Structure formats: structure tokens, C-alpha cells
Amino acid sequence: MERLTSPRTIKYIMEKYDFKFSKGLGQNFIIDDSVIERIVDGSDLSADDVVLEVGPGIGVMTEALCEHTKKVVSIEIDKFLIPVLKETVGRFEHLKVINQDVLKVDLMQLVKDEFGDQKPKLIANLPYYVTTPIIMKFLEERIPVSDLIVMIQKEVADRMVAKPSTKDYGALSVAVQYFTEPMIVTKVSRGSFMPMPGVDSTVIRLKVRTEPPVVLLDEETFFNTIKDAFGKRRKTLLNALSSGHLKISKDQAKRALALAEIPEIMRGEALSIHEFATLSNAIYTVKREG
Ligand code: SAM
């Protein structure tokens, strides 16, 4: 068989297995070898590494991951791709393919069973329709992975790395930067996939923090503060905080902002993660006082 990135190989597979691309499952396969090289380089892979892959497709990236690491576990939802993967990457004895929906599988158990105490790197060309839910599942449930190196829609990656007071800065920026240190690995144009998607992509590396970047009295209050502050972008903080998930009165919001020394008329998009921590700690304190 020719290289897996060759469109001819994809056509051969489609004919042999009567396979049809599923738009609903976000199936856009890489046909550009340089993209694979950039993902491998950006992941700093070594022979001692173990990898969890989501959505191997026909196995283009899986093949490279198997060549560079000691164990790869790939979760693929589409049962029609399982016999294909057997032909394309079945020769690797240190590869295990699991036919499951990554959003439904017990990831904590799976990672423990497959990798023991060693934290895998999560590496994936993610389906666009579930990019954020998959990433947030790993982060919020604190699935023990050391890094997430993922190809996602360019605009979503821009939001993840955005700084305060920029147009892309929002709840996703603060949440991702709370759990990880994000960095852009490389940009990938839509022409690098078959079929060609309607958007460009970015490979982003999220290095999972071992210590949080801020001290919080209560994590739930922190995330509710972010949701409320960005949920009503056009409102001042005073109005946004007293009309959402936090369930505090205007008087309590006023007292919390004073305690945090943040002006009432500011907007959420101007606050750094450290200011959000100070504010949410003040809200937690005021709420406890009643
Ligand atoms: N890794 C391949 C590549 O780069 O060419 C395929 C990437 S394609 C963008 C996304 C893959 O994820 C598809 O193979 C699709 O079937 C699979 N997929 C979609 N939703 C999934 C889910 N919830 N759980 C596991 N795999 C999923």
C-alpha cells in the first residue's frame, strides 16, 4: 500500500471497504505528510512516551505515533474504520484500537488500566463538532494526561491562547489557561485534508499544570464568576455578577467588587485570571457572610 496520506490510498480504502466519509463524525483525513511531522515534532515524542489518540481515522497519525513511542491506545467511534485500521496499522503490536465514543467511555479507568502510573500524551486531530467538549472533559475530570496536542479549528485555538482585553478573550481562554499552559504548535490550511473542510486548523499544545496558577477558596465559585462575567459581555461587572449563576444580590456583588478592589463599571473581558481569582474569592467570602 502507498503512504496513508496519499489521496490514492484513501480512494483505494473507500472502494475496498465501501467506506463513505461521515460529515457528522467530523471525518477529514490528513493528506499532507508535513502536518504529521509537525505534530510529531511539536509533541516532543520519545521512545519512552505513551500516547492516547482520539479518532485515528484510517491511521495516518497512528502510524507515526507507533513509530515514535512505546504504546499507543486509539479510540475510534466509527465501527466501519476498525477493519481498515487492522489493515493499515494492525502490524504494530504496541497499538490497541478501541471502538468507542470518547465522550461516553470511562476515561479515568481506561487511562489507569492501559497506562498504569505513566501519564500519556493525548494526541488527536479532533472532529470539529466536539472539540471543546472532548478537551474540557479531559481537563475538568482531571484525566491524568501530561499534555493535549490537538488539531482544532483555528478560531477555537485563538480563543484558548487569548489575553485579556482582546476580541478572542472569553470564558474558554480563562478555563483553558487555568488548567494548562497553552501554546500554538503550527497552523494548517484546509487543503491539507480530504475531504477539504470549510475552516482552517491549528495544532495547539496544552501542557497540563501540576499546580494551579491561582489560589482559590472555591473552584465552583471561580467558574461561575467567569460564566457570569462573560455571559453578559455588554453589562458592567456589577450587573453581570448579580444576574446569573452566582445567585448573589446587587448589594453582595457591590461588596465583593469593593473587597477585590475592582471597579464596578469594569467588564469581564478586561480581567486577568489572577483578578478573576481575587474576585471569586471575594464573592465566596461575601456569600458566606450572607
Ligand atoms: N486522525 C485521522 C486523521 O488525522 O486523518 C482522522 C481525524 S478526523 C478529523 C476525526 C476522527 O475522529 C474520525 O475518524 C472520526 O470517526 C472520529 N470521531 C468522531 N467523533 C468521535 C468520538 N466521539 N469518539 C471517538 N472518535 C470520534
Image: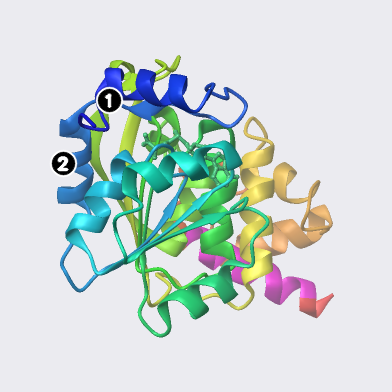
Measure the C-alpha gap from mark 2 to mark 1.
12 Å
Residue to which mark 1 is pinned: 31
Residue type at mark 2 is Glu
Residue 29 lies, with reference to residue 242, above or below; the image says above
The answer to whether residue 200 is visible is no
Residue furthest to the front in view is 16
Q: x, y percentage for residue 110?
A: 54, 71
Q: Dot 1 lies on which element?
A: loop
Q: Residue drawn 50% across and 39% down?
A: 81
Q: Residue drawn 37% across and 43% down?
A: 87
Q: Nearer the viewer, residue 236 or 35?
A: 35
Residue to which mark 2 is pinned: 37
Q: Is residue 175 left or right of residue 210?
A: right
Residues in magenta? 275-287
Residue furthest to the bottom in view is 117
Q: x, y percentage for residue 214?
A: 44, 71
Q: Is residue 198 left or right of residue 5?
A: right
